[in-house]
Amino acid sequence: MQKIKILSENLANMIAAGEVVERPVSVVKELVENAIDAGSSKIDIHIRDGGKRLIRVADNGEGMSREDALLSLERHATSKIDDPSDLFNITTMGFRGEALASIASISRFTLSTREKDAIEGSTVILEGGVIKDVRATGMPSGTIVEVKDLFYNTPARRKFLKTNTTEMGHINDFVARTALAFPSISLTLRTDNSVVFDLPAGSDLKERISNLLGKDDAKDLLEISAETEALSLSGLISPPSVQRSSGSALYFYVNGRYVKDKVIRHALLQGYGNYIMKGKYPLAILFVETDPAEVDVNVHPAKSEVKFRDSRALHSLVHAGIERTLNERQWLSETDRQGEVLSAKRIRTVQEAAAHYVSNNENLPLRGGHVRWEGESSGRHSSLLAKAEMRAANLSKFKEAEELVEKGPAWDVVTEGYFSSLNVTGQIGEMYIVCEGRNGMVIIDQHAAYERITFEELKRGYEKRSFKVQQLLMPETVELTHKEASALEENLEDIQRLGFEIEHFGGKSFVIKAIPSIFGNKGSKAIVTDMASELSELPKSGSFKSAFEEIIKRIACHSVVRGRRRMNIDEMRALLTQMDESGIVPHCPHGRPAHIDIPISELEKRFERV
């Protein structure tokens, strides 16, 4: 008796639908991608009951003839590839030719379409994949697809669908992702009687982000750009101050296609490194462009994953691009940047200096910098400098200041760094330093700031091999577990670069002879034990470098006085100077903020003045 048989076309389509159509959003995805491939500039999506009752997608694309409309409903029918070589040069969103046939097999399906130069359009009506009617129709050029009663003939599949709200949430997410990738396309999403998205066409990505993700997140995004011969990276990333508890705001696109890619994700998080707390995520919209031959988009039925020929090159590009963008300190607040304005600009007269300062500080006294004389020794001109500063601070005496300048060589204004320019007003709870900034109040967490300064110093010292070492008067012996001892011994050479002098004393014992001077009198045994513990947790293939930042985070934390500590004004000012010198980022190595800015506008709001 024959056991092997050929499946019917309809049954084969229903099985294929199981791969292509997981839930209503799968239908929306396929139809919207077809509309994009058709060259549409406007796409309208209408959903009812979370897509279970109705999914309607209308576009103004190129449309199809009657013959093409019928062929498009056959399995494996497509206009996007012709021969095997095309599979390695995919430039369209769709290409398999399974979607329409699969969707039609599990719904009540209507396709209406008209080419731009045609007198009339065509409508094809199917039910469960079977054609019920084909007729001429009057309609605008483009295509309209209606999918009603999804999974009506596969009730078991329909039972696995979630609530209307949940299914609609998935559709919202997909439309938002697509809208970010194609800001030049007008997108509308309606559900029942309400409008979810009404996004006009435009070329400004930030504006679209603002409409989709909120103005607060969009306004501070940083532009990123990097490229190699084979790859280019562009997009927007959030400053370290924007942190989320999940990766839901990570959007990755490869040649315009949204993907979930572990390589890009890992490179992104490594690029942020210690700028954000472990377990937190930034907001990022990244676009990778490459030769289609360098990426395989045919590795997942829903096309949500891709495979790169050279994933290492991609990782390096993304990691370096993120790191460089953050290291440029573009994420500093407007208040931070104002402290650097004068130092970035050469000002040749006292009048210019005063006018520039006063125009930005209408109600503040002149401070935060000094006027330096270029030319002869500073001693001869100290009194002149004092007079010049006093005159520059008074708008009514600009002319006298200018006359003074004309008698000597050029002047140059040198400002202090942002933190150094703050006016220290006091300390709260022996933990927080309160300062007055140009635009409001700045509060500094002294422990987090010291921790960050130490972390940056350790990092630079390791890279430059330039640590100041403090010899211990009495060497200390530390006893470790077998695993920790083995890990420490294997990495002694790298640990020496951190400023430690440690010798194996036999067995599980080590002798500590010197430590980085940054620790002062802190307990060296606890620090070395922590290092050994961190190294012992590395996987077999791991290296010291992969654990390096976690190690110096712990070291930095140990080196800082914890808890409360009363500081005098001089100590506070010294800390602010150190913050500038270290090129500090506004977070401790663990991601906690080192300082917060409260603008005057916020204070006015709190006191109900606005």
Image (cartoon, rainbow, N blue to C red):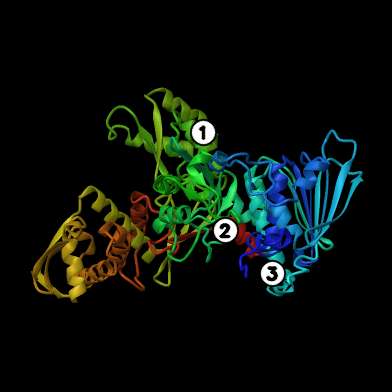
Q: Which residue is mark 3?
A: 166
Q: Which residue is mark 1?
A: 397
Three-letter code, disc 1: Lys
Position of residue 123 measured from the top left corner of the image (x, y, whole percent): 86, 49
- Comparing 58 with 521, the one in front is 58
Asked whether residue 610 appears in the rendered view, the answer is no
How far apart, in angstroms, are the residues tagged by discs 1 and 3?
A: 69 Å
Q: Can you say which quadrant of the picture contains the C terminus?
A: bottom right
Q: Residue at 37% x, 24% y: name it.
A: 408
Task: Please determine whether, in this image, residue 107 is positioned above or below residue 481.
Answer: above
Report how many numbered discs are placed on residues in the image.
3
- Comparing 555 with 438, the one in front is 555
**Farthest-out residue, front:** 1
Q: Nearer the viewer, mark 1 or mark 3?
A: 3
Three-letter code, disc 3: Thr
Q: Are marks 1 and 3 in contact (CB under 8 Å)?
A: no
Residue 175: which disc? Answer: none
